[in-house]
Image (cartoon, helix red, strand yellow):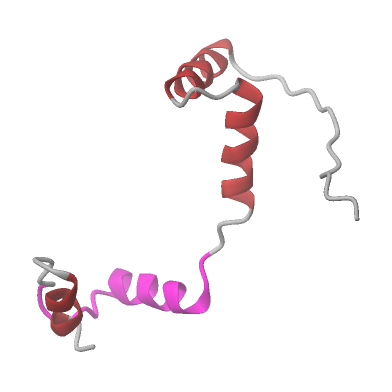
Amino acid sequence: MDLAIQKKAQSFRLPVELIDRLKILARKQNRSLNNFVECALLDLAYSEPNKDTIAAINEAKAGDLQGPLDVSSVEAMYKSMGL
């Protein structure tokens, strides 16, 4: 079984300042620029929220939240959420 992921080289034109910033961010994580950009793009391309998350986002945007959340502990948060 072949587990290798096929990859294709592609060139992009990006502003020099953006490349410099990406290099700094990659260096802070001890990663290559290529790996850093690939992971960032994978996160962007495959991080769509599920239906429960979308419903929660819409509830929050509509202002339908019931009172303040108690975030002093997980149990307190669930209780203040009515769960």
Q: In which quarter of the image is the C terminus?
A: bottom left
Q: Does the magenta stretch include residue 66?
A: yes
Residue 37: image quadrant is top right
> Residue 27 at x, y = what percent?
48, 18
Is 37 on the left-hand or right-hand side of 23?
Answer: right
Residue depicted at x 19% and y 88%: 82
Is 27 on the left-hand or right-hand side of 39?
Answer: left
Of the pair 36 and 11, the residue shown nearer to us = 36
Q: Which residue lies furthest to the front in this view?
A: 1
Give above or below for 25 relative to 48. Answer: above
Q: Give the range drawn in magenta.
A: 49-68
Q: Residue furthest bottom?
A: 82
Residue 11: image quadrant is top right
> Residue 2 at x, y = what percent?
89, 50
Prevailing secondary structure class for the magenta stretch in the rendered image:
helix
> Residue 80 at x, y = what percent?
13, 81
Give above or below for 56 relative to 8. Answer: below
Of the pair 33 and 12, the residue shown nearer to us = 33
> Residue 34 at x, y = what percent?
66, 25
Residue depicted at x 59% and y 16%: 15
